[in-house]
């Protein structure tokens, strides 16, 4: 059984106008697709900023931290903060990619 969603008429009308789709279900798919695309672009931009800052991929950064081969203390606030944020971005990117595949294809 398919779950049904009831939209208030004003919201449904706005959804159709924003997406320029003829039907609410198609409009929701378009909206979700665009949202996921924007989220992924934002995540990738932030990941690129870390790659530029540290001049390496996260995989190499992680290894350099583990082997104490960074020019900074791997236990410093800056390094640990970047590590956590960068790792979270990778997790979020994987999540949104799976969501895109599951929901929109």
Image (cartoon, rainbow, N blue to C red):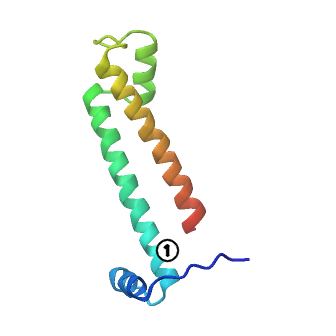
Residue extending farthest front: 8
User: Residue visible at 39% across and 85% down?
Assistant: 16
Q: Quadrant of the C terminus?
A: bottom right
- Please give left or right for residue 86 compared with residue 2 in the image: left
Position of residue 67 measured from the top left corner of the image (x, y, whole percent)? 44, 10
Position of residue 101 measured from the top left corner of the image (x, y, whole percent)? 57, 60
- Please give left or right for residue 51 compared with residue 29 in the image: left
Q: Quadrant of the N terminus?
A: bottom right
User: Residue visible at 40% across and 53% down?
Assistant: 40
Position of residue 22 measured from the top left corner of the image (x, y, whole percent)? 44, 90
Position of residue 71 measured from the top left corner of the image (x, y, whole percent)? 28, 12
User: Residue visible at 32% across and 33% down?
Assistant: 51
Q: In this rendering, is residue 45 above or below 55?
A: below
Q: Secondary structure at mark 1?
A: helix
Residue marked by disc 1: 29
Residue extending farthest right: 1
Badge 1 crowding class, 10 Å Cα cut-off, few under 14, some 14 to 19, many 20 or more, is some
- Please give left or right for residue 51 compared with residue 62 in the image: left
Q: In this rendering, is residue 27 above or below 46?
A: below
User: Residue visible at 45% across and 39% down?
Assistant: 90
Query: Between residues 55 and 82, which one lies in front from this camera angle?
Result: 82
Q: How many marks?
A: 1
């Amino acid at each position: 059984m398919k779950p049904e969603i009831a939209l208030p008429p004003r919201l449904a009308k706005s959804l159709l106008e924003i997406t320029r789709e003829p039907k609410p279900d198609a409009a929701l798919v378009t909206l979700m697709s665009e949202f996921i695309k924007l989220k992924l672009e934002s995540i990738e931009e932030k990941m690129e900023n870390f790659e530029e800052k540290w001049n390496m991929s996260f995989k190499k950064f992680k290894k350099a931290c583990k082997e104490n081969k960074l020019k900074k203390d791997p236990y410093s606030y800056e390094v640990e903060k970047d590590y956590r944020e960068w790792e979270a971005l990778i997790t979020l990117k994987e999540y949104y990619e799976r969501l895109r595949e599951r929901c929109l294809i």
